[in-house]
Image (spheres, grey):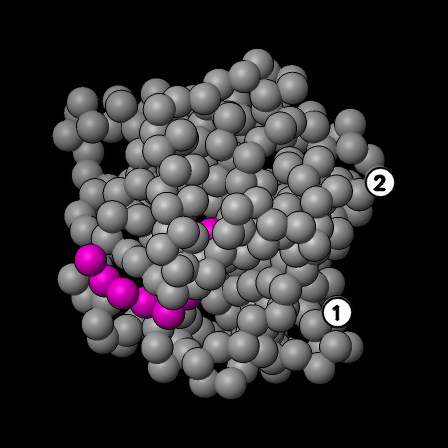
Amino acid sequence: MAEVRSIFLSDIHLGARGCQAHQLLDFLREYDSERLFLLGDIIDFWAMSHRGIYWSGQMNTFVQKVLKRARHGTQVIFVPGNHDEALREYVGSTFGDIAVHQEYVHTAADGRRYLLLHGDEFDVVTKYHKWLAVLGDNTYAFLVRLNMVLSWGRRTLGIPGYWSLASYAKRKVKTAVSFIYDFEECVVRSIKDRGLDGVICGHIHSAAIKTIDGVLYVNCGDWVDSCTAIVEYFDGHLELIEWGATSLPMAANAAAPAAVLEHSE
């Protein structure tokens, strides 16, 4: 198991049929950390409300694993998102050893300070037109389930590699691409006003580590489609782990984080 300083996860969507809890458990078997940050949409109350309750044994195992790590000294911070916004009523409280925050400022090992939040407050659709957000969520859930069928077909035909229909649709639909860039720019402007070095968030299911206007923008991605996480090593470097892109353990290379995904835009 690889030991890292921090793990950042978002958009797990426990309770939704598209949640790839088995992939997440495999990831956590390979990575342990001093700090674990859960940045929203960990539990999908929307899915359970609109599409029925679905809770697998693997989802329950994930919850138990997080609680166990918290009991054994891992600092666990939970920042609720829009899909688990009901838990925002408990900001300032703790569930066992898990602290609930509206947002959180994390100081990395290299001294850089990052604002941790989910990010839905920068999404005007989610904030002001919830019915449209729910419609988009249902469409996305359909694409994810269709992608499962396509993935099975690719494996049956012996086609190598991972391909995501949902991600392809987001890249090709002009309005979706425009929304992603608008979201990133809006988040970065807010961070600059607060004098912080960067932001780590989720919400849009589009994992990234990039520098925008001098600010490091980091998005954890999700565990419904892409299966991605952000890890911080003990020198403060951040890396995007694309767990969904491979079925092989990635921790073997964790001791030397050579491929830190930072680039300017």
User: As drawn, is 24 to the left or to the right of 176?
Assistant: left
Which region is colored magenta? 1-9
Mark identifier at residue 128: 2
Can the viewer see residue 170 in this picture?
no
Q: Is residue 7 magenta?
A: yes
The kind of secondary structure element at disc 2 is: helix
How far separated are the C-alphas under marks 2 and 1? 19 Å
Q: Position of residue 111 (x, y in %)?
A: 51, 85
Q: Is residue 3 magenta?
A: yes
Q: Residues within 10 Å of mark 1 (few under 14, many from 20)?
A: few
Looking at the image, tell me whether mark 2 or mark 1 is earlier in sequence order.
2
The kind of secondary structure element at disc 1 is: helix
Q: Is residue 175 above or below residue 142?
A: below
Mark identifier at residue 146: none
Q: Quadrant of residue 134?
A: top right
User: As drawn, is 234 to the left or to the right of 251?
Assistant: right
Residue in view at x 67 percent, y 40 percent: 87
Q: Amino acid at mark 2?
A: Tyr
Q: Is residue 79 above or below residue 22?
A: below
Can the viewer see residue 162 in this picture?
yes
From the image, tell me which residue sits under label 1: 190
Q: Position of residue 72 (x, y in %)?
A: 36, 55
Camera-side residue: 128 or 40?
40
Residue in view at x 27 percent, y 76 percent: 258
